[in-house]
Image (cartoon, coloured by chain):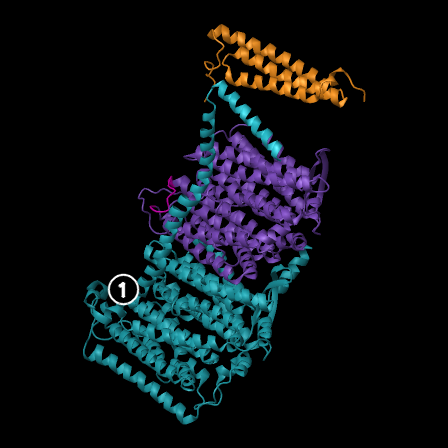
Amino acid sequence: MMMDNLLELTKLITPATLVPLFPLMGFLIIALFGKQLNHVSGWLASAMILVSFSLTCYLFLNLPDNKDLNFELWQWMKWGNVTLSFGFLIDHLSLIMMLVITGIGFLIHLYSIGYMHHDEGFSRFFSYLNLFIFFMLLLVMGNSYLIMFIGWEGVGLASYLLIGFWFKNDAYNDAAKKAFIMNRIGDLGFLLAMFFMLFYFGGLDYLTINEAASGIELGSMLITAITLLLFVGAMGKSAQIPLYTWLPDAMAGPTPVSALIHAATMVTAGIYMIARSNILFAMAPHTMDVVMWVGVATSIFAAVIGMKQNDIKKVLAYSTVSQLGLMFAALGMGAFESGMFHVVTHAFFKALLFLGAGSVIHAMSGEQDIRNMGGLAKSIRITWGTFLIGTLAISGIFPFSGFFSKDEILANAYNGHTLVWILLSISSMITAFYMFRLFFLTFSKGFRGTEEQKSHLHESPWTMTVPLLVLSIFAVLAGFWGLPAVLSDNHMFANYLAPIFAESKHILTLHAHLDHPTEWMLMGIATLAALISIGLAYHFYIKSNLLPESDDETKGITKWVANKFYVDEIYDKVFVRPIMLLSDLFYVLVDKLIIDLLVMATAWIVGFTGRTMRLVQTGNTGLYLFLMVIGMMVFMFIQLVY
Amino acid sequence: MESNILQANPQNWYLVLSTILFSIGVMGVLMRRNALIILMCIELMLNSVNLLLVSFSAYAGNSEGQVFVFFIMVVAAAEVAVGLALLVSIYRNLATTDIDVLSKLKW
Amino acid sequence: MLSLTLLSIPLIASILLLFSRGNLSRNLALVFTIAQLIFTAYAYTVFKNEGSQAFEFLASWSVKPVLNIHFAMDGMSLVMIMLTNLLLPLIVLSGYNREIERPHIFYSLMLFMQFALNGVFISFDGFIYYIFWELALIPIYFIAFNWGGENRAKVTLKFFIYTLAGSLLMLFAFLFLYNGSPAHSLDWVSLTNNPACSCNQTWLFWLFFIAFAIKIPIIPFHTWQPDTYTTAPTQGTMLLSGIMLKMGTYSLLRWLIPIVPAGVAEWQYVAITLSVIGIVYASVIAIMQKDLKRLLAYSSIAHVGLISAGIFALNLTGFQGSMVQMFAHGINVVGLFYCADIIMNRTKHGEIEGLGGIRLLAPQFATWFMIIILGSVALPLTNGFVGEFMLLFSVYQYNTWLSVFAGLTIILGAVYMLRMYQKMVLGSALKESLVFPDLYWNEKIVLVTIGILIFVMGVFPAPIMELTEPVLKNLIK
């Protein structure tokens, strides 16, 4: 029997199961033997991810056309007629995500070896990173919402651990806790959506649900409720209004973490989830509108805040929130493959930007305020060059990858939602502006830091620059995977994902394709807008030599913007304080005073009755006799009456 | 059912008599303060009940009532024996049998 | 016979221990609890899961009134027995490097408690069940009274009287059922087959419900619990929270629902509403608690509130989920209280504020504490998630809005647990002189066992579900 079980187990070992298994093994080994491994753990962790990446490439190359790998590992929970299994689904959508996760994941692991070299928690850091990759892979590889939920909460945990990595600092711990709890709010939505699906569709795996969903009336209450609840989950994980405030705070974590988790992979989980549930969302037009408008609002809102941030990582954080909003807007318009395309290109250039920022911080000995930087271009050449590529990509300059993906989303918006197109164009302009503001303030002009910092300025070791170079190549080239129709007939990316979105395209009656002149015009406008923004930034920060004022000088609207519109403070006043107050109120007033008083009152009444009744025992025999006779008479009277 | 000597009088008379005796006993118990007299009054009450039992027994032609009379007499004897012993003991200690004085046993 | 052996091992041990002294008594206690655990494992292997009762033992105690000694085990009993006998060795081991006065009496009482708890879970006659139910109260009273913290006389008296008052209601209900039942028997089988007239079921329901609600505790019958948990010695708190309150939830399934089905159906909405209110209420209170043990006590109220809510949803999901969650919560709460004990033992400081920096000094402890917290906040792949998922789903099946309200527990749970963890364990030490040695061997064994159980159960919860499924399916009918 033992042998049989072992054989069973060996059957489970396939390339697909090994992909998440390696990071898990890496996590366990490093967690248990981290002290002994010391600096080897970094290489071990990177190797694990490299193996996963190779396996993913193998799967990517060997997955037969239109034939998904869908298999079950074991039955996780089973009761009555409900069976929830642990299983994987490898199709084109999950493969793209897996490639991004393991590929960029590996580069960032490599980068971290250099970045974290002097940290005392070196091994711990890599064990957490591997744990994150494991959960992220579960998230995208699961064949049911439940497995996705495991990954969903798991990456939340990894994010919590990594944001609070430097746990001695209480502000970092606060940020970590905030991220976990805000994600949990979203998770509740996800959980409830799963209950709806389990109850009405009888299962949680994608096949069952997609099949059951197509039998439901378009836009019915049920499907709207499910999709809205799922979207609540996505809001939490992907930092959309109103649950976005944790992401900028999450920058407390080490920079590679910001690059991997809070830019490239985890925060795009919400987009992956909606893309995965595209059939459900296509069935719920109201939800689609909500998704689109929340995306648009977040995109603009975050971009505006980004204009006035002075912390290099905070700027990038708000730009991430803004770009995520852009992706959601694309999903809301039904342009799922455009959203996914932007996920991929964004993963490259945003990871690049964050790693570049990390390299800058590394060079500046931990300084993060761009007002104290400047003129770094000369001393850190590679970082400067790669950062420029990233900045151009995010600003949407031809032929960098951001141009193509962003253009596709804007074209989709123009084709049916003109207002959205205008708003997103504005948001893109703002993005180009603040990104170049960041770039100029960091790299151009003279150095504004201290002398000590200046003497320390140095380019990062090769483990850090190689990932930068590799990522910058992808940040340039990734766009060619999805050339617009005017340039090429073959949109490789969209075609690759076409089988996933075929059914929802069928449900959504989209407008006809734009004609070529219009497309040329849109591209022109986008490029022009970006160039104007860059020009403005150049004018302000190079020509006029403007410097952002220090914190106490800001006033008026800029102060509002610089303080992020006081959203955190409002949340604190509206939600956090009242709950704390309620907690004290419940404890002191309700629990101690009312409920416990009732309990103690019962005891007191018994005691009081005893104390009172004993007064009858006067010791006067005459009275006893008298009462006895009276009592007997009462009983006789009762006997007579009844 | 043959009649006997007890049935020579109407039963009501027995009832009235025993009620009167009983009431005298009750009033004595309630009114008097001397423990000895209270004991005697209790005796009176018991005997009034005995009388009632005997009369009912006779009228019903059933001897069960008379069995109870013997029971009561035994109990009364025992009670008087214990009660008087207690009284003697109390009198030796306090030189009184007034129940108003005997009020030590209270809360 | 197996049932009798299960009872006799701890009983004999408890008597034997009285004649031992010092270290010998705790070693003996450990040996006996492990023996009991092995025996339980044996019972599990020979147990045939067919939905009927196994290991039956039936003997007449008295002919009139008809009192039988009826022990048996079905899947539900077995799960609870497994939980009890699994936790006892851990609880005994957890006291190894603690100073305990008069250890022979302490451990003897603990073993006696095990005897009574095992008895509760395998009794199939109302009378004998009641005896064991009350018997379990006596050792824990003395443990809390003799080895407790400040204010123990008042707190333990309240605890004793409160739970006893509840039990008396149950006794009254049993007496009524005895007179009412045609067979004049309190046997579980006859009681379930001849339910009382539905005219009486309302108040029978309330008698049973209040008795169990006090033990569980469901608000508003909970005020004995935070005080008692705070005052009792940690081993006592572990017994109370890990196993003893499961007596209440178990009894809901074993006695209340099959015996007064109509009453349960009628008052379901009140019971489930109280439970759900309790979840949110206790979670909110836990957020601002200043005392660590008290915080854990309130979190425990929230968790068992969810268990009872799932039970009163009256569907298979809820029943199954509640069994899984009883097991999971038993393990987790023992772990949590042990961590609290470790902190308080080393720092002499039970307040959440004013500590910190423990992670720097004791990374291993911090890690295992975190893992147990993760189980407690129901992270997927830990044991807490499986139960919580099923229970929330069962509440959802009863009422959607109620499940939204109950679901707040996953947010609030994270809030109070992480807040506590951050203030006590993370950060830099507020006390300069903080001395905090990392885990000792016995602490390591206990915490690692608990940690592993948390994950194993989270990934493979199926064995427990399979054990209880046939029984609970019958219950649904």
Colour in which chain B is shown?
Answer: orange
**Which chain is cyan in the rendering?**
A
For disc 1, the neighbor class at 10 Å (few under 14, some 14 to 19, many from 20) is some
Q: Quadrant of residue B13?
A: top right
Q: Seen from this angle, which residue lies furthest bottom? A: A517
Measuring from the top left, give residue B98's x and y in whole percent: 48, 12
Predominant SS along the magenta part: loop
Measuring from the top left, give residue A457's x and y in whole percent: 26, 67
**Which chain is purple in the rendering?**
C
Q: Amino acid at mark 1?
A: Glu
In the image, taking residue A403 as reference, residue A631 lies left or right, namely right
In the displayed structure, would residue A421 be above or below residue A369?
Answer: below
Regarding mark 1 in the picture, which secondary structure is present there?
loop
* Residue that label 1 marks: A367
User: Foreground residue, A578 or A55?
Assistant: A578
Measuring from the top left, give residue A166's x and y in whole percent: 36, 57
User: Foreground residue, A6 or C341?
Assistant: C341
Measuring from the top left, give residue C139's x and y in whole percent: 54, 34
**Chain containing mark 1:** A
Q: Seen from this angle, which residue lies furthest front? A: B9
User: Foreground residue, C61 or A183?
Assistant: C61
Asked whether the viewer can see residue A345, the reply is: no
Question: Residue drawn at (70%, 21%), measured in percent from left and top?
Answer: B11
Question: Residue drawn at (45%, 29%), measured in percent from left and top?
Answer: A611
- Whether the magenta-drawn stretch holds residue C352 is answered as yes
Q: Seen from this angle, which residue lies furthest right? A: B1
Magenta span:
C347-354
